[in-house]
Amino acid sequence: MNCPAVGPVIRPRRNRLNPAIRAMVRETDLGPADLVWPLFIHGKATVEDIPAMPGCQRHSLDSAVNVVGEAVALGIRAIALFPAIADHHKDPDGTVGLDPDGLVPRCIRALKSAYPHLVIIADVALDPYSSDGHDGVVRHGRIDNDASLPLLARLAVVQAQAGADVVAPSDMMDGRIHAVRAALDAANLADTLICSYCAKYASAFYGPFRAALDSAPRARGNIPGDKRTYQMDPANAREALREAGLDEAEGADWLLVKPGLPYLDIIASLRAATTLPIAAYHVSGEYAMLRAAAGHGWIDYTAALMESLTALRRAGAGMIFTYGAVDAARALA
Ligand code: PBG
């Protein structure tokens, strides 16, 4: 009956004894070079706060150059640009996005001349430019996949010609990676990388982003005011492997999973299935939740951010898009 009073022989806690031991056995690291900072820009000369994303602003070109300088000084090597376009410039085809002197191309040129080594990632989708707010073009009462492809390809070429190092199709149309690759190659842009949002889910966590850009999808006729006919069903995991396989075969250089934390299983399964670099997008709603809870004093923003980013790395993401990139880089410094 009486158990001898011996302690356990094997004690995992020895590996947590002090900070030095913990650092030696740590399996996952996180550094500023792993982070991509998404930046909102607009055509105004002012800087505007984004209410649902405390700490994030819509920047003028001058302000973008300034804040990116701070990020670069902290070791961040890559940014992703997202434009807020005034409604009266939008049309169903998103034509304003194709202007080589438009907001995004001008910003790319300004940033490239200030920071030649900065990696600039440009988003390829029609939603910020389109009066329908959809990522593909609306024709004859439907989101027309094949009519979207040449528009997306031209958008990518315009961005790459302005100096974007990476174009990132986030639209989830079928066949767009092939269309973008072919158009880039035909335009002598064989060195431009493609980061494919291959597993992009129809997520409620994009809300603050759509408010920031006034880019929410609009219902019209048969077209629903959501993106569920092209973005993936959150209930599906196997389908992400199918999407990833297609995008890899079509020529994607990187694969991106989005949102981040709710989809760690998807990141891990893609990591096991492909040799391509994998990115995760810690999206606006995830960031807003951290800020909101921290604003109430309910969590420590920086600690929760670092834990979130570490979890994304642990799941298998090589790089992480996060609005907290500068905060994280500062915490790491
Ligand atoms: C649109 C796009 C979206 C995001 C990045 N690109 C929103 C959407 O699909 O509606 C979301 C990013 C975020 O929520 O942080 N092409």
Image (cartoon, rainbow, N blue to C red):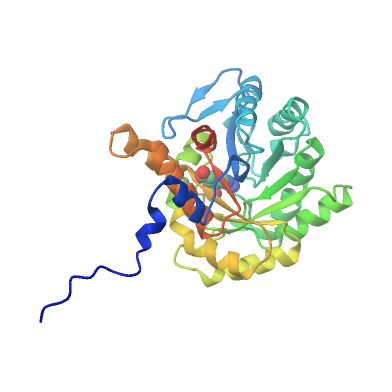
How many numbered discs, if any? Answer: 0
Q: Is residue 271 above or below residue 17?
A: below
At a point 72% along the width and 28% down the height, the residue shown is 111
Side of 51 where 186 appears, left or right: right
* Picture residue at 70% right of the left edge, 38% below the top: 120
Residue 297 location (% of width, % of height): 28, 34
Q: Quadrant of residue 65?
A: top right
**Residue at the farthest bottom position:** 1
Q: Residue at x 52, y 32 (%)?
A: 330
Q: Which residue is situated farthest in the top direction here?
A: 45
Where does the image place residue 58, in percent across and percent down from the top left?
A: 55, 28
Q: Does residue 222 appear anywhere in the picture?
A: no
153, 319: nearer the viewer:
319
Above or below 194: residue 304: above
Location of residue 215 by image quarter: top right
Of 174 and 309, nearer the camera is 309
Relative placement, left or right, of 120 versus 204 is right
For the C terminus, the image quarter is top right
Image: 266 above or below 82: below
> Seen in the image, is 273 located left or right of residue 190?
left
